[in-house]
Image (cartoon, rainbow, N blue to C red):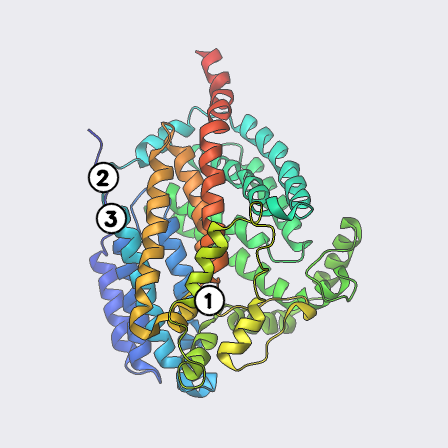
Amino acid sequence: MGKLNSYYRPSVLVLSLVALMAIFSWHTPNSLLTTASVMALPIYASLLWVRGEPPVLFFIIVHQWLEVTLEVFYANVSKLPIEELAGIPEVGKAVMLGLAALLALALGMRLAMSRLRVFEGVKMREEVTHFSSHRLWTAYLVAFPTSLLLAQVAYKFPSFTQPLLGFSYFKWLIFFLLAFTVLQTRKRRAYLVSAVVLETILGFTGYFSKFTYVFFLLIIVSVTVGYRMNVRNFLRLTAVGTLLLLLTCAWMSVKMEYRSYVNLGGGQQKVLVPFKERAIKMIGLLSSLDRKVLKEGLGLLVGRIAYIDYFAHVLHMVPQVVPHENGRLWEGVLKHIFMPRVFFPSKPVLASDSLITMKYTGLWVAGEEEGTSISIGYVAESYIDFGSRGMFIPIFILGLLSGFLYRYLTTSTQVKIFGYAAATVTLIDVIHFGSTNTKLVGGLLISFITMALALKFLTPPLHNWLIARQKLVR
């Protein structure tokens, strides 16, 4: 009989710190919003964080919590009411609705996982002790170029783009296994460092900041392996977080000039310059950074993460100027997902995210002509459809879907570390508050299908190969 799940319960120290922060919040220009933001985190943690298991669902909520609340804390530092900082009176309401939406999402996830009763953390740790780190590294070196090839081929066959991209994510499952094995056994650290460096270089020389993905997975694995917050684990997480912050600030500082270079000034979201030339350009841009430029990059990063302003503008426009859609946006999501282009080649192309944003916010935002796409996010789209009360229903259902997929993947294989790796890689795509309904749900389902197939057909031979060496030793 396995040990029952142990959900996170705030310690006396944590509760004391939260209480002190809540008291301090009343002396800030945004007292109510700050208090609500601070007290929300331990609630989310108690709903979703199972000690010793990959906290991907809690990580999703925390990332979105940052996107909702960061402007509140920034306004406090600036000693301004958030309405004055944002320049729109509805921003406070947007923050409160955003926190409530994340609670609805977390409740849906928790309800879907309510029957997961057996703690698997110990079994995962025992499983990786039988893995060959060298063979995991070899598997990663094979998966790395294969993933690049699948991503390139995917866009040449539009009907199969999403499935091919989904299978390219199998590389991340192997990275998860490599990171977990190295951190758990404390051996072959050079393999993990090399993989992180490779992914960082690849991310910095692409069009988007894909290097963040490898650090997100590294944080999740680090918390899983070292869920007891001792000094060593705290320092490890702090180092990873600091490095991610510095790299992201650097990217924000150079991305506009770099993107203009790699798309040859055409404004498309494409890389048209060979890798060597891109790498030289990026090295030159990074080498010219100084403290002042990095500080400006931090300001840009805060503006990028703080995604609540678009929702505030939606609240200002809907229904006063633009009426509620009464489910039309979510209806379009379902039609797009369940009418795959391979069977319905005449299916209309989705409208640009930027065009939708401009329609429902009244703002002008950069679009495809400028090589970007800006969305208002699934919470704002749910509000446009159903208003400030009905919006929680589809968000709760989205939480149920995420929790059910997590439960299926983690229980569908005998080797538990594979199931948790697949669940983490699948669900981490739900990380952004600004994701559109269509891309969020569609991408989630495609990732789930490809990972489920990988668990059935790819991981059994991989597992036998990883433990073959240990069998021979015995």
Q: Give the answer, above or below, for where 11 lies relative to 89.
A: above
Relative to residue 277, is residue 9 drawn left or right?
A: left
Relative to residue 201, is residue 390 drawn left or right?
A: left
Distance Cα–Cα, label 1 vs label 3: 29 Å
Mark 2 or 1, nearer chain start? 2
Question: Which residue carries the number 1 mark?
Answer: 377
Toward the viewer: 57 or 346? 346
Disc 3 marks which amino acid? Tyr
Where is residue 227? Give x, y as percent: 34, 46
Where is residue 97? Give x, y as percent: 33, 73
Distance Cα–Cα, label 2 vs label 3: 11 Å
The residue depicted at 42 percent of the width and 29 percent of the height is: 128
Mark 2 or 3, nearer chain start? 3
Where is residue 383? Give x, y as percent: 38, 72
Q: In this rendering, does residue 88 appear at all?
A: yes
Label 2 sits on a secondary structure element that is loop
Label 1 sits on a secondary structure element that is loop
**Are the two marked residues, 2 and 1, in contact with CB atoms closer than 8 angstroms?**
no
Q: In this rendering, does residue 41 appear at all?
A: no
Residue 253: quarter of image: bottom right
Disc 2 marks which amino acid? Arg
Mark 1 or 3, nearer chain start? 3
Label 3 sits on a secondary structure element that is loop
Q: Of circles 1 and 3, which is in front?
A: 1
Distance Cα–Cα, label 2 vs label 1: 33 Å
Toward the viewer: 350 or 278? 350
The residue depicted at 32 percent of the width and 56 percent of the height is: 397
Q: Of circles 2 and 3, which is in front?
A: 2
Question: Which residue carries the number 2 mark?
Answer: 117
Q: Give the answer, above or below, for where 473 lies relative to 128.
A: above
Question: Which residue carries the number 3 mark?
Answer: 7
